[in-house]
Image (cartoon, grey):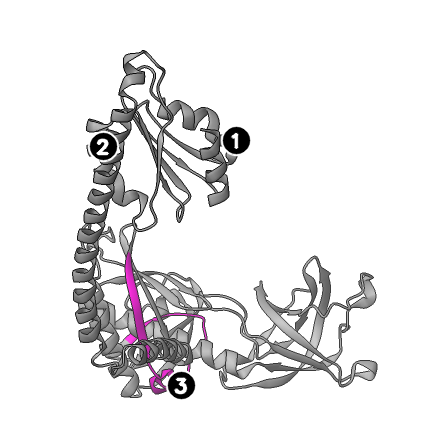
C-alpha cells in the first residue's frame, strides 16, 4: 500500500504540534527515518529548508521519550522525518526508537518555521515588485543561511533573454522600497489550492504556472489586482506585515541574469544590526557620529593622500642620499686600489651597505642610476625585509649578480634572480641573509 501523509501545514500554517501515527520506519545510511499519517512539518522544497523540531513517543516504553527531527523530505505522497543523530544509535535494524503503529506528538521549531515564512513571503513580495516596476522575471531562488538570492532576467515576448539589460543596484533598491511599502500596508496573503493547471492559470500570476496538478497559488493583496501572485509550495504568514521588512544587500551579474542578494524578517534585521554595530564602532573610532562618518573618512583619505605624497618624496630623497653615499664610497675605493688595478690585480671584494630607513622598492630608481656609474660590485641589504640587492659593472672580473643568486642563495633559503649586472635575493630571515653575505 502506498504511503500517504496529510500535510497539516497546508490547512493551518500556524499549527505548532499535532498527534500522528507512524506509518513506516527505516534505517538509512544517514540515520533513522519515519513517515506518519499526518504532520505539521513542512518538507524541504521550493527553495525552502524543511522544518525542524521534535517527536515525542506516547506508547509504552517510548512514552515521554523525545527525539530531535533535523530534516524532513517528501517522497511521493509521504512525508519522511529524520531523527537527529545523538551519538548513541545502535546498528541493528530493530534499534529504531519508534515502531509502525505508534502514536507520537510532532512539534515544529516555531522560531525556525516563522523565520522561513518571513523570508519566503519577503522573496515573493520583492520579486513581485521587480516584475511590476521593470518587467524582470525571477528565474531562480535560493534560501541560504546568511542571505537569499533571486536571479532576475529580462525577457522578450518569446521568453528569450534581452541581452545587455540588467537590474542595477539603484533599481533593486527602488524595488526594495516598494516591497517594504507592501509589507507595511499589511496586505493579506492568500494560499489557494487547485487540482489542475487550467484552474490555476485563471489566477493573475506573474509567470505561467509550470505544474499540471495539485497546485498552490500564493497571492499577496487582492486576488484581482495583487501585489504579487505566483505558484509556490512553501509556507507564508497570513499577512504581509508579519514579514517585517525586506533588505537588499547587493547585485551582481550572473550569466544573462542579475543575481540579487537580500533577506527578510528577523534575518534581515540581524544583518542590519551587525552592520550598524560595525558602523557605530567606526564612527566612535573616528570620534564622530555615523551620519558624519562619510565626511570624516573623506577628509582622512585626503590627509592620508597628502602624507603618502610627502612620504614618497622623503623616500626618494633618502634613496638619492644613499646613492650619493655609495658613489662616494666607490670613488674612494677606486682611488685606493688604482695602483693594484694598473698592476693587473683581480677584482676586489664588493662594497656592502645596510639600509633600515627605506625599503628595497624605494631604492629601485636609485639602483638604475647606480648601474650607469658603478665600478666594481655593490651589495645593498635591507634587513627589515631580509632582501639583498646586488649590482656590478660589466667587466669580466666583476661579480656575476644573477649567477651568485641562482647558484648560492638557495643554500641559505634564498630565492630570486637577475642578470650579470643586477639581481635580487629574498631570504626567510635576517640571519640567513647575514650568513649568505659572509660567504661573499
Tell me if residue 412 comes above or below residue 164 in the rendering. above
Relative side of 429 to 208, left or right: right
Contact? badges 1 and 3 (CB < 8 Å): no
- Say if residue 394 shows up in the picture: no
Task: Using the rendered view, name the quadrant where residue 281 is placed.
Answer: bottom left
Residue 182 appears at what percent x and percent y? 27, 82
Q: Nearer the viewer, residue 436 or 157?
A: 436
Helix, strand or loop at label 3? It is: loop
Instruction: Provide the residue span drawn in magenta.
Output: 228-252
**Which labelled disc corresponds to residue 411?**
1
Pointer 2: what residue? 370
Task: Using the rendered view, name the quadrant where residue 437 is placed.
Answer: top left
Pointer 3: what residue? 238
Tell me if residue 71 comes above or below residue 400 in the rendering. below
Q: Residue at x 40, y 22 (%)?
A: 403
Q: Residues within 10 Å of mark 1 (few under 14, many from 20)?
A: few
- Say if residue 246 shows up in the picture: yes
Q: Residues within 10 Å of mark 3 (few under 14, many from 20)?
A: many
Amino acid at each position: 500500500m502506498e504511503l500517504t501523509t496529510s500535510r497539516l501545514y497546508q490547512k493551518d500554517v500556524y499549527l505548532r504540534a499535532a498527534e500522528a501515527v507512524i506509518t513506516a520506519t527505516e534505517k538509512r545510511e544517514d540515520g533513522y527515518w519515519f513517515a506518519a499519517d499526518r504532520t505539521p512539518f513542512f518538507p524541504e522544497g521550493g527553495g525552502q529548508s524543511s522544518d525542524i523540531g521534535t517527536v515525542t513517543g506516547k506508547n509504552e516504553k517510548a512514552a515521554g521519550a523525545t527525539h530531535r527531527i533535523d530534516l524532513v523530505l517528501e517522497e511521493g505522497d509521504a512525508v519522511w522525518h529524520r531523527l537527529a543523530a545523538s551519538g548513541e544509535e545502535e546498528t541493528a535494524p530493530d534499534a529504531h526508537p519508534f515502531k509502525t503503529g505508534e502514536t507520537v506528538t510532532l512539534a515544529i521549531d516555531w522560531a525556525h518555521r516563522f523565520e522561513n515564512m518571513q523570508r519566503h513571503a519577503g522573496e515573493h513580495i520583492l520579486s513581485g515588485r521587480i516584475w511590476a516596476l521593470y518587467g524582470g522575471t525571477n528565474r531562480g531562488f535560493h534560501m541560504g543561511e546568511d542571505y537569499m538570492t533571486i536571479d532576475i532576467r529580462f525577457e522578450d515576448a518569446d521568453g528569450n533573454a534581452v541581452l545587455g539589460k540588467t537590474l542595477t543596484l539603484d533599481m533593486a533598491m527602488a524595488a526594495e522600497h516598494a516591497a517594504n511599502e507592501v509589507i507595511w500596508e499589511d496586505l493579506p496573503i492568500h494560499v489557494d489550492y487547485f487540482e489542475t493547471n487550467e484552474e490555476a492559470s485563471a489566477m493573475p500570476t506573474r509567470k505561467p504556472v509550470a505544474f499540471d496538478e495539485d497546485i498552490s497559488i500564493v497571492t499577496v493583496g487582492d486576488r484581482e489586482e495583487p501585489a504579487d501572485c505566483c505558484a509556490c509550495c512553501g509556507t507564508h504568514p497570513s499577512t504581509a506585515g508579519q514579514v517585517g521588512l525586506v533588505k537588499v544587500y547587493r547585485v551582481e551579474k550572473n550569466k544573462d541574469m542579475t543575481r540579487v542578494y537580500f533577506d527578510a524578517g528577523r534575518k534581515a534585521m540581524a544583518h542590519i544590526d551587525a552592520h550598524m554595530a560595525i558602523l557605530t564602532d567606526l564612527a566612535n573610532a573616528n570620534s564622530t557620529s555615523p551620519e558624519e562618518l562619510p565626511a570624516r573618512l573623506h577628509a582622512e583619505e585626503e590627509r592620508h593622500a597628502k602624507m603618502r605624497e610627502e612620504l614618497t618624496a622623503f623616500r626618494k630623497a633618502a634613496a638619492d642620499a644613499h646613492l650619493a653615499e655609495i658613489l662616494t664610497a666607490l670613488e674612494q675605493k677606486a682611488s685606493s686600489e688604482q695602483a693594484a688595478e694598473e698592476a693587473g690585480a683581480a677584482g676586489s671584494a664588493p662594497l656592502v651597505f645596510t639600509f633600515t630607513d627605506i625599503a628595497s622598492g624605494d631604492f629601485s630608481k636609485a639602483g638604475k642610476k647606480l648601474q650607469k656609474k658603478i665600478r666594481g660590485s655593490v651589495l645593498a641589504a635591507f634587513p627589515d625585509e631580509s632582501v639583498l640587492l646586488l649590482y656590478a659593472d660589466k667587466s669580466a672580473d666583476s661579480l656575476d649578480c644573477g649567477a651568485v643568486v641562482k647558484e648560492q642563495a638557495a643554500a641559505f633559503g634564498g630565492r630570486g634572480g637577475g642578470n650579470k649586472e643586477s639581481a635580487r635575493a629574498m631570504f626567510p630571515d635576517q640571519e640567513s641573509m647575514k650568513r649568505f653575505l659572509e660567504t661573499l
